[in-house]
Every structure is written in structure tokens, then in C-alpha cells.
Amino acid sequence: MDPPADHTLQISREDLNYLTATQRRLHHRHHNHSSTPSSSSTTNTANSGGSLSLDPQALAALSNHFDALLAAITNRVETLSAQTVRSTQASHRRAGGVVEAATVEIETLRDVLRQCDELQNEFLKIRRIGEIVKGFRARVDALERRVGK
């Protein structure tokens, strides 16, 4: 049966259920690992499954448990934060490498385009020279015809 909500402590039924269940687990764990006979004499019903024990020893155990849980969570958050920073830095380095490689490729393509423009200009010069040669050949042919007549 669920314990009633404790309105004097402002604890919701859900939180009270969680605290009671945690206290029972701690009590059970403590009794399974303890070799002293005095450790089995708690003052309230944390082991009977009914309500939250408010005696100092039970509350200290609960406090220690939650302190350890908070430390574990804090450690995990710090670990995940460090991993996130390392991952972000690695991604940034890779992105920087990609940008550098792309910049080099762009410069290479610009150089190729510049060379293509130069070749196109050379082809235009060759065509113009060909037109000039045709013009000279036409004049020479015309002069030969006049002289040969």
C-alpha cells in the first residue's frame, strides 16, 4: 500500500514512495553486508515496507546515499561535458582541414581557369594570324595573277 502524502514535510506521494523504497533498499543492503548485531535495530519501519523512517541513522544513510548519487551524477555530467568539448574540438579541427583543402582546390581551379583564359587568348591570336596569312596569301595570289598576265 502506498504511504499517504506527507503535507507537513511538503513531500508528494511520488517522492515519498521513492524515498521509502530507497530507504528500504539501503536498510536491506546494510543488513546483508553488516556483521554487527546492533545494526539490525532501527527505530522505525523502513524494513517493514510501510513508511519513511525519520530516525537520525536512517536519515543519515539516506542523505549519504543521495550525496553519493549526486556525486555520481555530477561526475557523469563532467565526463560527458569533457567528451562533448573534445568531440566539438575534433569536429572543428576536421572542418578547418576541410576548409583548408577546399581553399587549396579553389585556388587550383582558379589557376586552371586563368590558364584556360590564356589558352583561349592564344587561340584567338592564332586565328587572327591565320586570317592575316589568308589576307596576305590572297594579295600574293592577286599580285601573281597581275604579274602573270
Image (cartoon, rainbow, N blue to C red):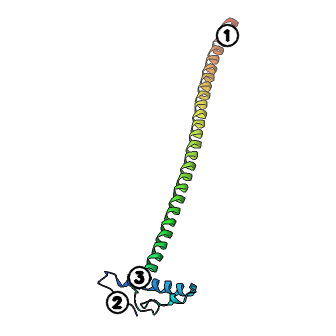
Identified at 57% across, 84% down, the residue is 33
| The quarter of the displayed image where residue 54 is located | bottom left
Whether the residues at callouts 2 and 3 have beta carbons within 8 Å, the answer is: no
Identified at 40% across, 94% down, the residue is 1
Q: Position of residue 27 (x, y in %)?
A: 49, 86
Q: CA distance from mark 1 to mark 3?
A: 130 Å
Tag on residue 130? none
Which residue is nearer to you in this view: 120 or 113?
Answer: 113
Earlier sequence position, callout 1 versus callout 2: 2
Whether the residues at callouts 1 and 3 have beta carbons within 8 Å, the answer is: no
Tag on residue 56? 3
Earlier sequence position, callout 1 versus callout 3: 3
Q: Position of residue 55 (x, y in %)?
A: 40, 85
- The residue indicated by pointer 1 is 145
Q: Position of residue 140 (x, y in %)?
A: 66, 11
Q: Residues within 10 Å of mark 1 (few under 14, many from 20)?
A: few
Identified at 57% across, 46% down, the residue is 98
Q: Identify whether 108 is placed above or below 89.
A: above
The amino acid on which the numbered mark 2 sits, given as a three-letter code, is Pro
Tag on residue 4? 2
